[in-house]
Image (cartoon, grey):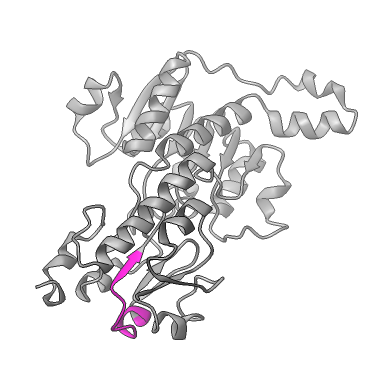
């Protein structure tokens, strides 16, 4: 029987999908440096939180599949996996709706100044209402960076609120954006200068890391609301702290930060115009169940020698081990 190592326990639907079909081992840690000896005993690895790098992949000749119960693979060395004939399974579309809804929730919350209003009201400061810090969104422009599945759902929410939608995605044609009823920005600068809300929906890549920085924050309006449910390293956090504390932008709501778990005492946590959640946008029972089952089923299929379609690196199937 094949052995599948889990970085952490899966939501029960995923555990049930694996039960009886493979030997399940749980590391309770996702750092490949720490759990290397366990990885070397595994045929498959399902990674929730942590990373697996080239060193670990090359040290695990029996590893046949790596799976992510989601779509982000910035914590997997996909190039090394491909070179070693290891498909990297993902769960496309499983959490798109949940993440888009969370982005909407953050946008609404910071536009209505709910974090500060809640905290001050609990202290007995009813006069916080006189700050007039809330914003009506209808008629404003939502600038959406990226136009993948999550972004498309979020755009539909913004449109339903009566907002204008401006898209920046260099990999999507203008005709597709226009067909959806939106306008495409020619570059990021056009979006940042024209948007009242900026919402990030792109993966972490060398090109996108710190795309929101001192320079790009300077281009935004002082009334801008910034939302990030994608990846923490898209934003230079110290630059964001400066922009929020000096009024260069109005507020920010994020589900992701550079360091996760998010450390207590982070400087951004001190700001009343900053709202954070612990990377839970995709953690609804509905989305989680779909994602873990897709990851489990893909893992099992590949261990049976099947070419599972939902992988980020189909070139792995060209490796001699698949001949």
Q: Residue at x 52, y 53 (%)?
A: 12
Query: Which residue reaches farthest right?
Result: 124
Q: Work out which quarter of the rendered image holds the N terminus and state it.
A: bottom left
Q: Residue at x 40, y 41 (%)?
A: 201
* 41 relative to 266 in the view: left or right: left
Queried whether the magenta region covers residue 196, the answer comes back as no
User: In x, y percent, where is residue 48?
Assistant: 47, 61
Is residue 187 visible in the rendered structure shown here? yes
Query: Which residue reaches farthest left?
Result: 323
User: In x, y percent, where is residue 36?
Assistant: 44, 83
Query: Which is nearer the eye, 239 or 127?
Result: 127
Q: Residue at x 30, y 83 (%)?
A: 58
Q: Residue at x 39, y 23 (%)?
A: 156
In the image, residue 122 sits, relative to residue 70, either above or below, namely above
Q: Quadrant of residue 39?
A: bottom left
Is residue 70 visible in the rendered structure shown here? no
* 181 relative to 289 in the view: left or right: left
Query: Which is nearer the eye, 123 or 141?
Result: 123
Magenta part of the chain: 55-66
User: In x, y percent, where is residue 66?
Assistant: 34, 67
Query: Which is nearer the eye, 75 or 95?
Result: 95
* 119 relative to 257 in the view: left or right: right
In the image, residue 212 sits, relative to residue 98, either above or below, namely below
Query: Which is nearer the eye, 90 or 265?
Result: 90
User: In x, y percent, where is residue 216?
Assistant: 44, 43
Queried whether the magenta region covers residue 60, the answer comes back as yes
Q: Work out which quarter of the rendered image holds the C terminus and state it.
A: bottom left
């Amino acid at each position: 029987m094949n052995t599948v190592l889990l970085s952490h326990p899966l939501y029960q639907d995923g555990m049930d999908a694996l039960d009886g079909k493979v030997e399940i081992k749980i590391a309770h840690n996702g750092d490949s440096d720490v759990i290397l000896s366990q990885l070397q005993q595994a045929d498959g690895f399902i990674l929730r939180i942590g990373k697996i790098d080239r060193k670990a992949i090359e040290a695990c000749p029996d590893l046949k599949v790596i799976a992510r119960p989601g779509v982000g693979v910035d914590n997997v060395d996909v190039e090394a996996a491909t070179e070693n004939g290891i498909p990297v399974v993902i769960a496309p579309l499983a959490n798109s709706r949940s993440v888009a809804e969370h982005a909407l929730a953050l946008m609404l919350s910071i536009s209505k100044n709910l974090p500060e209003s809640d905290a001050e009201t609990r202290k007995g400061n009813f006069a916080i209402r006189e700050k007039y810090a809330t914003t009506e969104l209808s008629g404003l422009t939502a600038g959406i960076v990226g136009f993948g599945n999550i972004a498309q759902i979020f755009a539909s929410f913004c449109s339903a609120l009566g907002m204008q939608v401006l898209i920046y995605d260099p990999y999507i044609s203008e005709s597709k954006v226009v067909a959806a009823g939106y306008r495409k920005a020619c570059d990021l600068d056009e979006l940042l200068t024209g948007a009242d809300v900026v919402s990030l929906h792109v993966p972490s890549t060398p090109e996108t890391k710190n795309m929101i920085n001192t320079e790009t924050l300077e281009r935004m309006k002082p009334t801008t609301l910034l939302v990030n449910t994608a990846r923490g390293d898209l934003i230079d956090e110290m630059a964001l702290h400066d922009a929020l504390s000096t009024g260069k932008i109005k507020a920010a709501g994020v589900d992701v930060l550079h360091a996760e778990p998010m450390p207590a005492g982070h400087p951004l946590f001190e700001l009343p115009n900053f709202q954070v959640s612990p990377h839970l946008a995709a953690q609804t029972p509905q989305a989680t169940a779909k994602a873990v089952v897709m990851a489990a089923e893909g893992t099992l299929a590949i261990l049976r020698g099947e070419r599972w379609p939902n992988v980020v690196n189909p070139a792995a199937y060209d490796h001699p081990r698949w001949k």
